[in-house]
Image: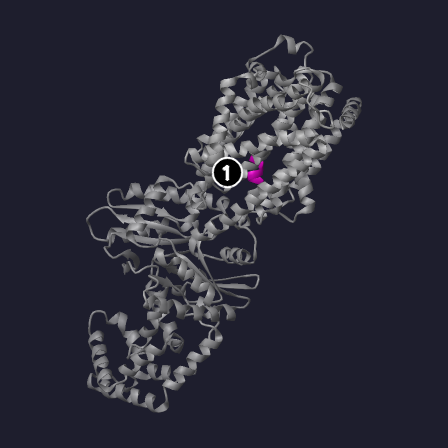
Amino acid sequence: MHRFFIFLYYLISRNKILSVFTALGIALLCLFFASKINFEEDINQIIPKNEKSDLTAKVLKQLNFSDKIIVIIENKSNEDSFQLSETADTFLQKIEPLQKYIGSIQGKVNDNEISETFDFVNQNLPLFLNENDYKEIERKLQKDSIAKQVEDNYISLVSPTSLVTKEFIKKDPLGLTFLGIKKLNALNISKDFKLEDSYIVTKDGKNLLLFIDPKNKSNDTKANESFVDQLNTIKDNLNKQFKGKTEISYFGSPVIAVANAKQIKKDIQNTVVISMTVLLVLLIYYFRNFFTPIIVFLPTVFSVLLALLILYFIKDKISAISLSVGAILIGITIDYALHILTHYKHNNNIEELYKEITQPIILSSATTAVSFLCLVFVRSEALKDLGLFAAITVILSSITALIIVPQLYKPKHSEEKLNTNFIDKIGSYPYEKNKPLIIGCSIIILACLFGFRHVGFNEDIGDLNYIPKEMKISEAKLQKLSDITSKSIYTISYGNSEEQALARNSQLNTFLEQEKKEGKILSYNSIGSIVLSEKDQQKKIEEWKNFWNDNKKHQTVSELISNGNKFGFNSSAFDNFNEVLNKSYSTLDIKDYEKVKALQISEFMSNENGFYTVSNVVKVDENKRDTFIKDIEKKHDAIAIDRQQMNENFLGLLKRDFNTLINYSLLAIILTIIVFFRNFELTVLTMFPIVLTGVVTAGILYFLGLELNIFSTVVCTLVFGVGDDFSIFLTQAMQKEHTTGKNELPTYRTSIILAVFTTILSIGSLIFAKHPALHSLALVALIGMFSVIIITSTLYPFWFRLLITNRAKKDFPRSPSGY
C-alpha cells in the first residue's frame, strides 16, 4: 500500500505546477456543487423513523400552538388598569413596522369583531346548537319566559348601554344566538382572564397579555433573529418610558430558539478563537514553522469539500443538523496530518516515512469511518446523514493527508538531535514502567467496571435548551398567572381530506367534553363544536328544521308581537327574528369560517400537500396523562402528543439504537483490523483499549453523578474513533520494537499527544460554554479523551510487552504469524 503513495509523491513532485492547478480545479468544482446542495433544517429529522413517528413528525410540522410569543405587560403601580391599555396601545404602534415578521396579534378585541362574530353565529345559528341548547330554547318559548325576555329587552333599550344592545336585540330578541356563542368558549386560552378595555387581562387586572404569532416557524432562527432583536429594542425603550408604571416582558419558543442560536454562536466564537490561537502557537512552537497549521488543516478542508461533492450526487437533501455536529466530530481528521508531520520530523526519509505511517493511518481512518458508517442503521435521517458525511470525510482526509502533507512540509535534517521540547519529553517518558501509575489506573478501571452499567441517560431534550435569565423570570410570571405554560397535551385529528379530518375532530370533541364533565381533564381548547364537516352541518340543519315546525314559529312570533305591544314595540320590530326562523340554511366551507377573525381557524387547522390536521390543546392532571393518551389513540383516529413524553419515547428509541450501533461498530472495527493485521491475537489486543475507554468514560460519568444525552452519546463515536486510532498506532510501534528491537514508541506517543491536544483544544474548550448541550458534549469528550490517552499510553504498552514481547523472550510458542 505504501508503494502507491510513494509513487504518487514522486509523480506530484515532478509535476508540481500541473498538480497545483489540478488541486485548485477540484476544489472549485467541489465548491460549485457544494453550493447547490439542499439543506434540510427540520429538527424533526432527528426523530427515529417508524410508522408511528413518521405520522407524528408529519403532524408536528403542522402544529401551530407552540410558536407564539406571549407579551406580558405588568402594572407596577397601584393606579387603575388604564396604564396597561395605554402601554399596550403604544407597544402595538411601535411594532407596526415589523408586520413583515408578524402573522397576527391576539389579545385586543375590537367592537367590530364582536359584532362580526355575533352576526356570523346569528346567520348560521343551527350549526352552533346542540341537544341541550334545544332544551333551553324550549324553556325560553314558554309564554311567561317570552314575556319576561321582552320586558328585559325593553329595560336594556332604555338604559345607557342601548347603543350596544339595540342591534343584538333587534336581530335576536330571545337571545338564542348567545347559546351558540357559548360554544366559542372552547377557543378561550384560559379561564384565568377577562376582557377589559378591549384587552385580555388577568382577573386581578394587574397583567395584560398579547399573543404574537410570527410568520416564521420558531426553529427558523435566522429569520427570527432580526425580529427578536427589534422586539428587544422596543421592549427596553418602552420600559424606560413607562418606568415605575408598567413593565414589558415576553416568553415563547421563537425567542428561546433565537437565544439558543445566539448563545451557541457566542460560545463557539469565544472558545474556538481561544483554542485555535493556543493550537496555532503550539504547532508553530513544536514544528518551528509558521506554515505548519495551514498544512495541518488543508487535508481536512479538502476532504470536506470532496465529501460534499459526493453527497451532492447521492443525496437529494442533507440534514443541516448532521453537518453541524459532523463539523465537530471530524476534528479527528486533523490528527492524521499531525501523525505524518511528527513522524516526518523524526524521520526525514520519505520512503521510510510512507512505509512506517501508511498502514496505521489507512487502518485508523477505515475503522473510524466504519464506526461512523454504522449510524446508517439508526432510525434517524439526521444521524444517517451525519454517519455518511463523517465516514466519507474521515477516509478522504487520511488519503489527502498522505498525499498533501509530505509535499508541503520539509523537516530539517538535524532537527531531531537539536530540538527536544516539552512535548517530546512528555512523549518519551516510559509510562508503562511507572508501577504506581499502572496500579492506580487498574483500580480506576475495576471501579468503572462496576459503575459503567448504571450511567443514566437524560431523555428530556428540554434540559439541553439554553434559557436566558429574563426568559426564566417571564416563564415564572406566566406560571403564576395561569396554566398557559403548564405542560399541555396536543390531540390532533388528521385525514387525507378536510371533510375526514373535521368529522374525526367532531367525534374527538364529544369525547373531550365528556372527559371534562367527568373531571378526567382540566380544560381543553377546540373548534370541534364550531367547525363541522359537511355531513355534521347537514345533520344540524335537519335538527333545526325538525324543531321549528310551522306551528311553533307562528306561536313564538305571535307571543313576541303581543308582549312587545305592551312596551310600545311596533309590529315590524321582530321581522329580523322571523327571517332567522324561516331562513333556508346551507352548509359552510372552511373559507366561510376563516372570514371571522375571532374564530382563529388557522390556529387549529392546517393543510400541507393534501394532509389535513385539526389540533386541540388539553390540560390534564400529571397522574392522568398516560391513561388519557392511551384512550385517545385507542378510541379515535387521532394522535395525542405530550412533548416531554414524546421526546422521552423517541430519545429512548434512539438510545436503544445506539446500543445496537455500539455492537455494530465494535464488530465492524474488529473485522477491519483483522483484515489489516491478519492476526487474531493482535486484533484482540488492539480492541482491548477501545472497549476499556468506553467502560471507563461511562464509569467516571456515573461516579460524578452525570448523565449521557443525545448529543454527548454521538460524541462517544468520536471517542471510539480516537481510541482505535491510538491503539492502532501503538500496535504499529510495539510491532516494530518486537521485530527490530528499535524503540520508536516515543515518536508514536508524541504524535498521539499532539492529536490529543488538538482534540481537547478544539472540542474540550467548549467545557466553558454556557449552552447546556455544548457543555455536556465537551464534558464527555474531555473525560473520553483523558481515558483514551491514559489507557493507551500507560496500560497498552504494558499489556503488549507482558503478553507478546516477554513471552517471546521466554521462548513461549508464537502465533502462526510470529507474534
Local crowd size for mark 1, using a 10 Å CA cut-off: few (<14), some (14–19), many (≥20): many
Q: Where is residue 335 in the image (x, y as percent from the top left)?
A: 61, 27
Residue most extreme to the bottom: 551
Which residue position holds label 1?
712
Q: In this view, does 35 lie above or below 641?
A: above
* Image quadrant where residue 396 sits: top right
Q: Position of residue 589 (x, y in %)?
A: 48, 72
In reply to whether residue 325 is colored magenta, the answer given is: yes
The residue shown at (27%, 74%) is: 166
Rendered position, 544 above or below 182: below
- Magenta stretch: dominant secondary structure: helix
- Which of the pair 201/67 is nearer the observer? 67
The reply to whether residue 614 is in sight is no
For badge 1, the amino acid type reads Ser
Vertical comparison of 120 with 601: above or below: below
Question: Which of the two residues, 95 or 786, is positioned nearer the viewer here?
Answer: 786
Q: What element carries label 1?
A: helix
Residue 754 occupies which quadrant of the picture?
top right
Q: Residue at x 50, y 38 (%)?
A: 712
Q: In this view, does 128 lie to the left or right of 337?
A: left
Q: How far across and down, in percent of the image, does residue 657 sit?
A: 56, 47
Q: Please give the range of residues in magenta.
A: 323-328
Residue 286 in view of the camera: yes
Q: Is 807 above or below relative to 501? A: above
* Nearer the observer, 388 or 117: 388
Indicate yes or no whether the magenta region holds residue 579. no
